[in-house]
Image (cartoon, rainbow, N blue to C red):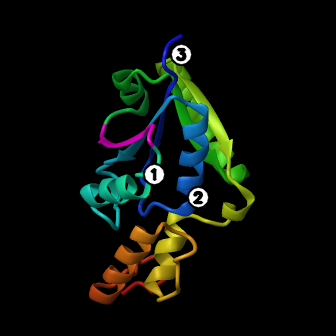
Amino acid sequence: MSERIAIYPGTFDPPTNGHLDIVDRAAKLFDRVVVAVGMNLAKKTFFSDEDRIALMREACARFPNVEIRGFDTLTVDLARSVGARFVIRGIRALSDFEFEFEMANMNRKLAPEVEMVFLMTSPEYLFLSASRVKELAAFGAKVDAMVPPNVAKRLAAHANAHSLRTGATEPSD
């Protein structure tokens, strides 16, 4: 029987406990899970590509069958390159489903041999998003319960050294 390999792609800016919940559950379903940190030039990220990879690698160190890597290709091309037949996606709400459904159909057109696997978010993480975590941290709110300890530490260091404000909630100049 061949090894069941899945990829879990995302921006992970920053990694949250919701992301780790999906990793934990995927690691129990598959022989090998490749967490793929997207390096998308069109997306403005708070943490650099290298930082997001390092943060996720440290946060996932307890999972022996999980590896972390960056990618800047189509998701299905990454899946093929690592021998994955499955792409893991977490879904929090109906709005996530609509986006993921569209993406799944496009991926099926590009790579019919790659299956999308949707994992429903655990109830305690339904409200959690990386964008909200950054916004809360920018205003000095404690986010320790929402992110892994290494991420909380980095967010606190950045909040003290730089402004975390994203422009989403500040008046425009």
Give the side of residue 64 with respect to residue 105, left or right: left
Label at residue 62: 1
Q: Can you identify the residue that label 2 sits on?
A: 18
Residue name at image x 34 percent, y 58 percent: 52
**Tag 2: residue type?**
Gly
Residue name at image x 38 percent, y 32 percent: 74
Indicate whether 58 appears above or below 85.
Answer: below
Q: Which residues are magenta?
A: 64-72
Task: Indicate the position of residue 81 as horizontal and vertical percent values.
Answer: 34, 23
On the question of residue 166 being in view, the answer is no
Assess whether mark 3 and mark 2 are in contact (beta carbons under 8 angstroms). Answer: no
Q: How would you rate the neighbour count of disc 2 (Cα within 10 Å): few for under 14, some for 14-19, many for 20 or more?
A: many
Label 2, label 3: how far apart the Cα atoms are: 28 Å
Majority secondary structure in the magenta region: strand
**Tag 3: residue type?**
Pro
Upstream in the sequence, badge 1 or badge 3?
1
Label 1, label 3: how far apart the Cα atoms are: 33 Å
Q: Can you identify the residue that label 3 sits on?
A: 112
Upstream in the sequence, badge 2 or badge 3?
2
Upstream in the sequence, badge 2 or badge 1?
2
